[in-house]
Amino acid sequence: MDRAQKEKLVDELGQIFDSSGVVVVARYEGLTVADMQSLRGIAREAEASVRVAKNRLARIAVKGTQCESIDEFLGGMTVLTFSEDPVAAAKVVEDFAKTNKKFEILGGVMGGTALDRAGVAAVSKMPSRDELIASIVGCIGAPASNIAGAIGAPASNIASILSTIEEKAEAA
């Protein structure tokens, strides 16, 4: 890799660190290529990304960004998992780590806040952006459906009373 390619990679990593809601650093020593492809596929489905980069270049790129605290984790065979959604990448790595014992989560950063291993686990248990939006929409829509139900209820009550009266009249 020549100097121009390294500078381009440092710029790309810098943009990733600046624009990501969460960045998780993990050690992947001992994983097979198939395992890494599986991790990338899972991440893609969750709208997250996985990137392996030279630690030296990642350290250069992380300086002066909100992710500067992950510098301490950049050693050995590390992989970066990141997403705009502040929860997606953490969920991906936590789920992957449950099935792959060789995948070790070191820590990460979320919006400038450093996360240790326990912090990444806590973030992974939070609802994602899509889940929060669905919850809010449900809360907004609930009063409207209650009003519609209340408006329609008297008509259905009258109809059931009339059918009961009719059944009694036919029986007599």
Image: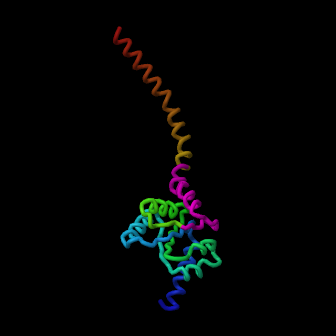
**152, above or below 172, in the image:** below
Query: Residue 98 occupies which quadrant of the picture?
Result: bottom left
* Residue at image coords 49%, 71%: 27
Which is more toward the observer, 152 or 99?
A: 99
Q: Is residue 18 magenta?
A: no
Which is more toward the observer, 44 or 38?
A: 38
* Residue at image coords 48%, 63%: 93
* Residue stretch rendered in magenta on the structure: 106-135
* Residue at image coords 60%, 75%: 71
Measured from the top left, where is residue 19 in percent x and y?
A: 57, 71
Measured from the top left, where is residue 138 in percent x and y?
A: 52, 46
Report the label total: 0
Query: Residue 10 occupies which quadrant of the picture?
Result: bottom right
Which is more toward the observer, 60 or 13?
A: 60
* Residue at image coords 51%, 53%: 131
Which is more toward the observer, 20 or 35?
A: 35
